[in-house]
Image: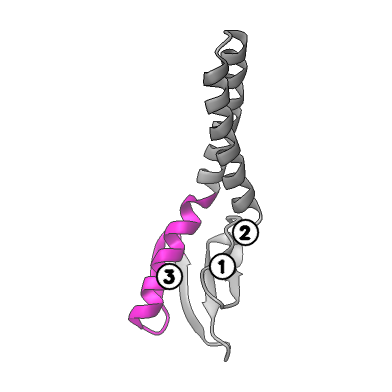
Amino acid sequence: MSGFPFHKLAPLPWKVMPGGTGISCSDEKGSKVCATRAGHAFPERGERESQALAQAIALRVNVFDDLLATAKLFEQTIEFAIRVAEAAGDDEGARLKSITLQMVRATIARAENA
């Protein structure tokens, strides 16, 4: 299952469904409020709010790991581009790429520490 920080989306206890097929959340009384499975959202109570929440979570859960992996690959690509720029004597290009690298690393850190 995704490393997505469910607790940041809603103050509900999120649980991974058996087999890692999706997630579900319950309210303070233990009643299931919503669930997501394989990118599809379905509310247990039929409430619009629950459906909207489940859809938002499903979207984020399904792309979180891929986006984080892509950001890490981009980090490596920028590191390489900086080395190439430095070897070519392009100090300004290397400096600009270093600024971008700092932003990418900050984004990765936020995602990993969410």
Residue at x-position 42% and y-position 58%? 59
The numbered disc on residue 36 is none
The x and y percentages for residue 89 are 58, 9
The numbered disc on residue 8 is 1
Q: Secondary structure at mark 2?
A: loop
Q: Main secondary structure of the magenta part?
A: helix
The x and y percentages for residue 37 are 46, 64
Q: Is residue 79 above or below residue 7?
A: above
Work out whether mark 1 precedes mark 3 in sequence or the reverse, and give the earlier one.
Answer: 1
Query: Badge 2: how crowded within 10 Å, few (<14), some, or many (20+)?
Result: few
Q: Tag 3: residue type?
A: Ala
Q: Is residue 24 above or below residue 71?
A: below
Is residue 51 within the magenta segment?
Answer: yes
Please say if the residues under marks 1 and 2 sit with CB atoms less than 8 Å apart: yes
Residue at x-position 58% and y-position 72%? 14
Residue at x-position 62% and y-position 17%? 83
Residue at the spot of label 3 = 54
32 left or right of 87?
left
Magenta segment: 37-64
| Quadrant (top left, top right, bottom left, bottom right) of the C terminus | bottom right
Residue at the spot of label 2 = 114
Image quadrant assignment for residue 27? bottom right
Q: Is residue 44 above or below residue 14?
A: below
* Viewer-side label of 2, 3: 2
